[in-house]
Amino acid sequence: MATPVNPNQDPLDPVRMEIDEADRQLIQILARRFDAVRRVGSVKHASPTSPLLDTERERRVQASWVQDAESQGLSAAFARRILREVLNHSRRLQESFIDTRETLGRAIVCGYQGVKGAYSSQAATHLLAMRSKAESRITGFATFQEVVEALLGGELDYGLLPVENSIGGSILDVNRLICDRDLHIVDEEIWGVEHVLATKPGTPLSALKSVRSHPAALTQCDTFLRGLDGVEREPWFDTAGAAASVLDVADGTVGAICSEEAAASYGLDIVARGIADQDRNETRFLLLARGPETPDPRLHCKTSLLFRLNHHEGSLARALGVISSAGANLTRIESRPQPETPWEYLFFVDVEGHSEAPALAGALRQLRTCCNHLRVLGCYPSRTVRQDRHLDVDAPATLAPAPLDIVETCPVAPPPMPAAGSTRPDRTKGALRIGGSTFGEGHFVLISGPCAVESLPQIVEAARMVRAAGATLLRGGAFKPRTSPYAFQGLGLEGLRFLKEAGRQFDLPVVTEVLTIEDIPLVVAHADVLQVGARNMHNFALLKELGRVDKPVILKRGMSATVKELLLAAEYILAGGNQQVILCERGIRTFETATRATLDVSSVPVLRRLTHLPIIVDPSHAAGDRELVVPLALAAAAAGADGLIVEAHPHPEEALCDKEQALTREDLAAMVAGLRPIITAQGRVWA
Ligand code: PEP
Ligand code: MN
């Protein structure tokens, strides 16, 4: 007997019941899947070496999902989208098994830009919930900059900032902050942006006179908005802020494009969904911290790099070649102009892989030798689920990585020191160009000038004199580290200005000493090369700061420092990012008192064996006596130094500093005359 039809029943009711039942099953099935994933996680956890991500398995899962979905009449694109979320969640569940991060014993605080309901706040909530076992709290700030200040000031543990969008591209202000500030990337989040049109409760779509939102969101919904006749577009500072603001419009004729969550949190009606031109709109966020966090080696990771290259032909190709020879997949490359040096670029590069995995670690060491500046911004779990559109058609066999060609060229010798005769550093990649001069690659450079800048006429005359003698860089101290506090301390800022002016008049890049961290910006603004004096070689705080500077640094050997200590001091600068370090032997303190210091000529070939960094010699401070400077200079060239830094003064008898060792015009000429045949005999060229 047929079931009697209840005339009062809505014919949709049974269908809705069926939907509700299917939804319940969907949740149960997902819970079952994730439970199984957890069990896989605990098995993988027990094996300390096997990687968490099984790419081949993921490929197979994706292919069968798509096939099954299509056989059920569902679109492949839809199936991929759901699977992306499922795989993402599964990976993170497994990750939590191997998370050894210590908890802080209090709630973790993460800042984001925007207000409650903003896409940033959703991404932050999600990422923190997945990452940490500890309680977490998120807090909104008006600008990206404010998030960074609060993070660096210790008010926040993390900051989550959007770095790029799949439609709009790179977010410049955030990239700039990452370049300029001491930030470390510790995680990423890929967040799907799904815009809705929301109105004040009770207002229908037809009543709207304008729609406000962030300009990017308005652009992303262009086709939909064009379809709304006579509706104005109102740019707003952000999407959630636009949602909050529509409540204040008395007649309710203003709508907002925002996230579904923002609409809900401000109690708005949603009058349209799926309004973006592009189906897939994703924003990539970076989780920033004050220090690095090293992920478990089993995780599928990304490593983000920032580097600057010398202006040589082929230098970008060479840098990328180093990455590709490590078999590392490049997921992003972007350049950023540097206003202070027009037409030179910083490159942001993301590569797949753990920075401590042997191949990538080797590539990073090699990359240092061909970059002026290299910073590892962070190594963190990769959240991108790669989905190959044609995967389901014909899954390509995974290519074997290219054979590794990683010469173990440490920028400097890390302890333990390599044994004599071990692989030598590749010096051809270490050449450093400053103005027209090349340090390394078969060149010899003379840097000369007075110990101290004393006046504009003095330094201008000195510049003329050293240039005529064949020097290609001008030295002169503005901040002098004197043994006696009563001795002339240098002209400071005025000295820097005079030095810069003299360099400009004679087209000579200028070298000057920087004594303190506070002086760095001033010295950077005036000099082409920064010198760290012997007394400061152990000033690690200063060296670390110089690692963040984009100017070459001459690092002098401390008076009682070993070669190894000199190399480790250089490592402080290199590790901070700055790869433009020139080592300088200037004599060490021994029992001998006949000379000011004892020039350790042997350090030149010893360093040559250990590092690709250029090596110069300062015979002036070693000798302390003009007559001895020339023979020591010749010995240094003969030992293979890449150049010399020599004190010279137009009127040594009037010099305010180190007058006994300052070369005269004639001495300088004699020295150069003696040097040239040595350089030529070695097959090298001058400057
Ligand atoms: C200098 O070069 O002026 C100087 C002070 O040298 P050092 O640090 O080697 O003593
Ligand atoms: Mn001096």
Image (tube, rainbow, N blue to C red):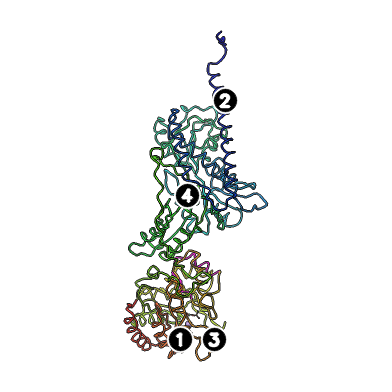
Tag 1 residue: 655
The mark closer to the camera, 3 or 2, is 2
Q: Is mark 1 on a helix, strand or loop?
A: loop
Specify the segment rendered in magenta: 541-555
Closer to the camera in the image, 599 or 138: 599
Closer to the camera in the image, 163 or 392: 392
Q: Residues within 10 Å of mark 4 (few under 14, many from 20)?
A: some
Tag 4 residue: 163
| Distance (Cα) linking label 4 and label 3 | 55 Å
Q: Are marks 2 and 4 in contact (CB under 8 Å)?
A: no
Give the amino acid type for the residue marked by disc 2 in the picture.
Answer: Glu
Based on the picture, tell me whether residue 683 belongs to the magenta stretch. no
Which residue is most to the right? 105
Q: Is mark 4 on a helix, strand or loop?
A: strand
Tag 3 residue: 590
Among the two numbered marks 3 and 1 on one chain, the one whose residue lies closer to the N terminus: 3
Position of 463 relative to 33 (above/below) = below
**Is residue 471 rendered to the left or right of residue 157?**
left
The mark closer to the camera, 1 or 4, is 4
**Is residue 186 rendered to the left or right of residue 498?**
right
Based on the picture, tell me whether residue 545 belongs to the magenta stretch. yes
Q: What element carries label 3?
A: loop
Give the amino acid type for the residue marked by disc 3 in the picture.
Answer: Thr
Task: Report x, y in % for residue 242.
Answer: 51, 39
Task: Report x, y in % for residue 288.
Answer: 54, 53
Among the two numbered marks 3 and 2 on one chain, the one whose residue lies closer to the N terminus: 2
Among the two numbered marks 4 and 3 on one chain, the one whose residue lies closer to the N terminus: 4
